[in-house]
Amino acid sequence: MDHGFAYVMTGGFLGVPFSTDGLANKAFGVAGISWDGSVTNRTGARFGPRGIRQASHMLCGDEHPFFDTTPVEDLVDLGDLLLPNTSLESMRAALIPQVASLLASQSVGQQMVWLGGDHSITLPLLRAYHAHYGQPLAVIHFDAHCDTWESHFGEPSGHGTWVYEAITEGLVIPEGFVQIGIRSSGERAAREYVNEQGGRIYTGRELRGRDGAALQDVIDEVRTRMAKLGNPPLYLTFDIDALDPAFAPGTGTPEPGGLTTAQAMTLLEAWYDLNWVGMDCTEVAPAYDHAELTTNAAANLIWTWLCGRMLAKSEGKTY
């Protein structure tokens, strides 16, 4: 008889065994990027992968209540990538080849989820994806912060510059860049940068109090935008501080007035069959969490995305 519960479970995300054999024949892989050397406020996101994995064990591998599927049998956890922890450029130089190797081993329909880590990890991930696909990507970016500053408190790069860098480097399609939940303070040039490049920003204020059918115009507009661009490869980056601190207090730079977990779930469920090629979840800092609210939210959001990909795969909608 199996008497295992979440607090005694071993293994990786959703309790699947850790593997050193790459994706092998699994559709989805998870890997941790335990780096937080670029934060501007509270450190601790290096422990995000561990916290997200532990919280995911509560899901017990059962079927998603909306998608009626589970990725457990088609998922492998590759553990945390080995990285230096004192130099941003050294970290990125070590990260990109490891990501490139995993992407090169993918067959059609295989995809990775990256557990951060602070948001500076997304730039090298996009560099690797751009090289792999040979074209710029579309991006849906959940965040409280625009991350479009041209410098990082006197340094050239950090967790608040990656969007600006990705656009100026040509890694992404400006018109295919969608930001959701932006609400932090900042100069107007940075706050409006994505809009002025042809993308779309849904601010926290614009989304305030809207859920269910009230989000349908957002859902439809993003779908239409991607279709007009020819449905390019689409990447999801979810900074957990997109959620209001009431739902995700365990993060380095919390900003009041954010999304509810339900709003985020509604959008991810509605976009399950977009042309996704991968995702990351960043800025989860368990040391500042309360009652595991943040790690549970992160684990559920990732699980929802994976289950949506499982359904899309069964429908033949894979990139």
Image (tube, grey):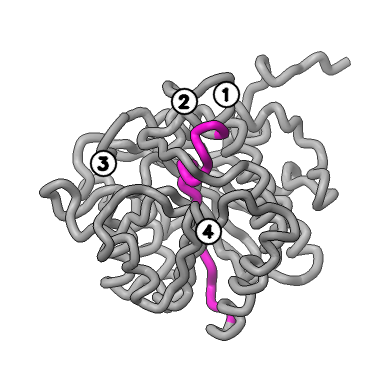
Q: Which residue is mark 3?
A: 38
Q: Are marks 1 and 2 in contact (CB under 8 Å)?
A: yes
Q: Could you tell me the amino acid type at mark 1?
A: Glu
Q: Is residue 238 shown in magenta?
A: yes
Q: Could you tell me the amino acid type at mark 3?
A: Ser
Q: Which residue is mark 1?
A: 292
Q: Secondary structure at mark 2?
A: helix
Q: Quadrant of residue 230?
A: bottom right
In the picture shown, does residue 200 fall above or below 282? below
In the picture shown, does residue 180 fall above or below 33? below
Point out residue 204 in the picture as x, y percentages from the top left corner: 49, 52
Q: In the rendered view, does 292 fall on the left or right side of 170? A: right
| Distance from Cα at disc 3 to Cα at disc 1 | 24 Å
In terms of sequence position, does the residue under pointer 1 or pointer 4 come before the other?
A: 4
Q: Which residue is mark 2?
A: 286
Task: Give the number of the disc on residue 206.
Answer: 4
Q: Secondary structure at mark 1?
A: loop
In terms of sequence position, does the residue under pointer 4 or pointer 3 come before the other?
A: 3
